[in-house]
Amino acid sequence: MKLLFIFLLLVTFSAHGVPNKLESQEFKSTKLLAEKGDAKAQFDLAVMYVRAEGVLKNEDESIRWVRKSADQGYAKAQYNLGLISENGWGVLKNLKEALRWYRKSADQGYADAQYKLGFMYDQGKRVIKNPEEALIWYRKAANQGHPEAQYNLALLFDKGEELLKSPEEALRWYKIAAEGGVAKAQNKLADIYDNGYGVSENPEKAFIWYKKSADQGYAGAQFNLGAMYNIGRGVEKDLEKAVRWYRKAADQGHASGQFGLGLMYRFGDGVLKNPKEAVIWYRKAADQGNAKAQSSLADAYCYGIGISKDLKNCSSWAKKANDGGYDTSKLWNDFELWKYQ
C-alpha cells in the first residue's frame, strides 16, 4: 500500500506547498533519464513534479510523465494511472479506463492493483459483480502480503456466497491480516475468540486482540474493550477503564459506545453520576438509530430523569425503539403512551 500513500500526494493537486525556484540536480538527472525512455525515471519525475521536489510544481506534467511510464508497461505507473482515472484527479473520471490500467498492472503481479481489481469485482464497480473473480485477485494480492486483500479475502470466505464459504480459510486469513496490523481484522479475530466462532471460546485472547485494534483507534474495538472492562471478561473488571474506552469510541461517533457511555453516567459507574450527561449521550446514539438508546431516552422523558418529563417525546422515542426491535411495551402500558401519538 506504500505507493498509494505516495500517490495520494501525487494526485491531490493541492495548491499548497512551497515549490523550489530552481531545478535541483536530482531533478535534472531524473529528467534526463526519463527523456531517454527510462520508465522508472519517468514515474519518479511525475512524483517530483507534483510534489515540487527540485522543480516548480506542475500537475499537468506529472500526469503526462505517469502516462509515458505506464505506456511503457511500468506497473507502478499503470496502477497510479488507474487511481487517477478512477478518482478523476486532473482528468475526467473514467472507471472503464481505471479498470484497464489496474488490470495491466495486476497482470504484472503488482499487489495494490490486484487488490483494486479484486475490490472492483467484489463491489461490482464498472464490471459485473463476480465474487469468484474477486477471490482470485484478492488471493494473488494476499499471497504477496497485502493486508487489505488478506482481510477482504477472509470476508469472502466468511460472509460471501455459499459456494465460497470456508470457516477454516476465513479464520486463517483473519489471523494473517490481524498479525499484519489490520485493525478491523484484529477486532474480528477478537470477536471470534470472544464468542467461540469455530474455535474454543477464549476471552483472554479476545481481550488481547481487541486491545491491539483499539490502540489503533478502531472505534468498534474501543467499544468492545470498554465492554470487557465493564463486565470483567478476559480482564479484571475496571469501570474507570470501561468509561475511558467507551468515551474513545463515542467520540468517534460509535453509537454503541455513546449508549454505553450514557449508561455509565446514568448509574455512576466509573464516573460521577450525571443523568443529564447520560441523556446527552443517549440522544447521540438514538439519533443514529440505536434502539436501546432510543428506549433509554424514552425512559428518561417518561420518568423525568436527567431531562424534564415529557410524555409526547417519551412516546415518540418509545415508538422508534419499538420499531427498531426493542420492546418498550412496559412504558406504553405504564404511561398510556398511545394517547400522545
Image: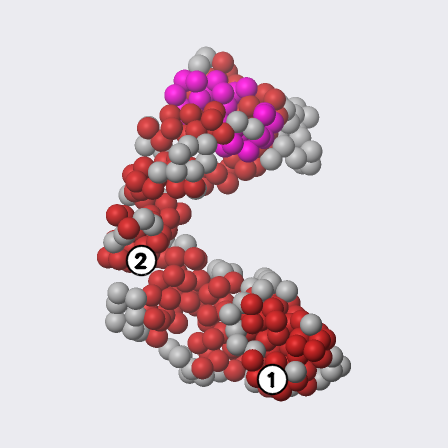
SS under mark 1: helix
Badge 1 is on which residue?
Answer: 333
Residue 133 at x, y = what percent? 32, 37
Q: Taking 30 as reference, is 300 left or right?
A: right
Q: CA distance from mark 1 to mark 2?
A: 49 Å
Q: Quadrant of the N terminus?
A: top left
Label 2 Cα neighbours within 10 Å, binned few <14 / some 14-19 / many ≥20? many
Counting residues from the N terminus, which is met first, the one under dot 1 or under dot 2?
2
71 vs 272: above or below: above
In the image, what residue occupies the spot 37% across and 45% down? Answer: 149
Badge 2 is on which residue?
Answer: 175
121 vs 331: above or below: above
Point out the residue furthest to the front here: 339
Q: Which stretch did the figure color magenta?
A: 64-92
The label nearer to you, 1 versus 2, is 1
Q: Is residue 95 visible?
A: yes
Indicate the amino acid at tag 2.
Lys
Front residue of this view, candidates 58 and 211: 211
Front residue of this view, candidates 195 and 184: 195
Q: Quadrant of the C terminus?
A: bottom right
Front residue of this view, candidates 135 and 180: 135
